[in-house]
Amino acid sequence: MYSAEFIALFIAIIVIAFLYSSVGHAGASGYIATMALFGFAPNVIRPTALVLNILVALLGSFQFWRAGHFKWQLFWPFALPAIPGAYLGGYLQLPMSILRIIIGLVLLFSAARLFIRKKDPDDVHPPSTPVALGLGGAIGFLSGLTGTGGGIFLTPLLLFAHWAKTKQASAVSALFILVNSIAGLIGFVRAKQTIPSLAYSLAIAAVLGGAIGSYLGSRRFPVRAIAILLATVLVIAGAKLILTR
């Protein structure tokens, strides 16, 4: 029989997966913050978040691709160097206290801009391949270090640089998160770490919330709603990074 605490955690994971997947993200920062509040140890939280991230990102990638928002030419220059970057970041264990605060503040600033963003720009232009390759490697490394899939860094960058429209950015970020989360988890396991049983227990919650959220985000929610939801996600992620010690 499941305890009341586990049921509350299960419901929280459903809500987080729904919220994040509706904007093409997978929820790692939300899962990490929630599990920390429930008192789980870091060696349980990080791999569990990555497993849930993979499941939700897989659903998001499929739904946004089916809806016609995915752009391969925008995706691959960011993803190619991000995969080894995420592997390296997942393998290394570096002190993150100051970097977390800086990243958190950047995410909060990005959220503020999204809250006042009214619509997509009329014209978007993908970045040059060298620029995308360089940024992709840096984002992948950060995603591995922080235990996230990198979408919280990539999506605002694509939007504010006018490299993609909102749902295009969500579609690209979903697959970007998927490949980075897989690479990060492989790096974690190769570092002689194990995947906790909690990850398997919460998988159903993540899939349930992710399936509903990604469907609505890719097909039903208007662009303005996506922007507001994305800003909310960034606030959660930014606050989590700043407050984590």
Image (tube, rainbow, N blue to C red):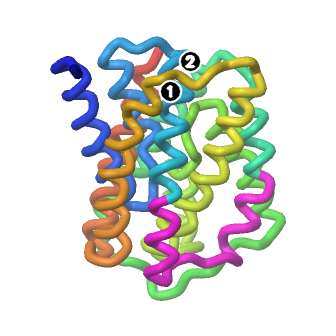
The reply to whether callout 2 and callout 1 are in contact (CB within 8 Å) is yes
Residue 222 in the image, given as x and y percentages of width and height: 27, 76
Residue 28 is inside the magenta segment: no
Residue 177 in the image, given as x and y percentages of width and height: 58, 52
Residue named by callout 1: 101
Q: Amino acid at mark 1?
A: Ile
Task: Name which residue lies at 50% across and 54% down.
Answer: 57
> In the visual, does 83 lie left or right of 8?
right
Extreme residue toward the front, this view:
1
The image quadrant that residue 12 belongs to is top left
Task: Name which residue lies at 27% across and 76% down.
Answer: 220
Q: Amino acid at mark 2?
A: Ser
> In the visual, does 112 lie left or right of 192?
left
The image quadrant that residue 30 belongs to is top left
Residue 74 in the image, given as x and y percentages of width and height: 66, 73
Residue 160 in the image, given as x and y percentages of width and height: 51, 64
Extreme residue toward the bottom, this view:
122
Q: What is the magenta range?
A: 59-81
Residue 77 is inside the magenta segment: yes
Residue named by callout 2: 97
Task: Name which residue lies at 58% across and 25% down.
Answer: 195
Q: Is residue 2 above or below residue 103?
A: above
Q: Mark 1: which secondary structure?
A: helix
> In which quadrant is the N terminus drawn?
top left
> In the visual, does 19 lie left or right of 96?
left
Main SS of the magenta part reads helix
* Depth check, front residue: 121 or 186: 186
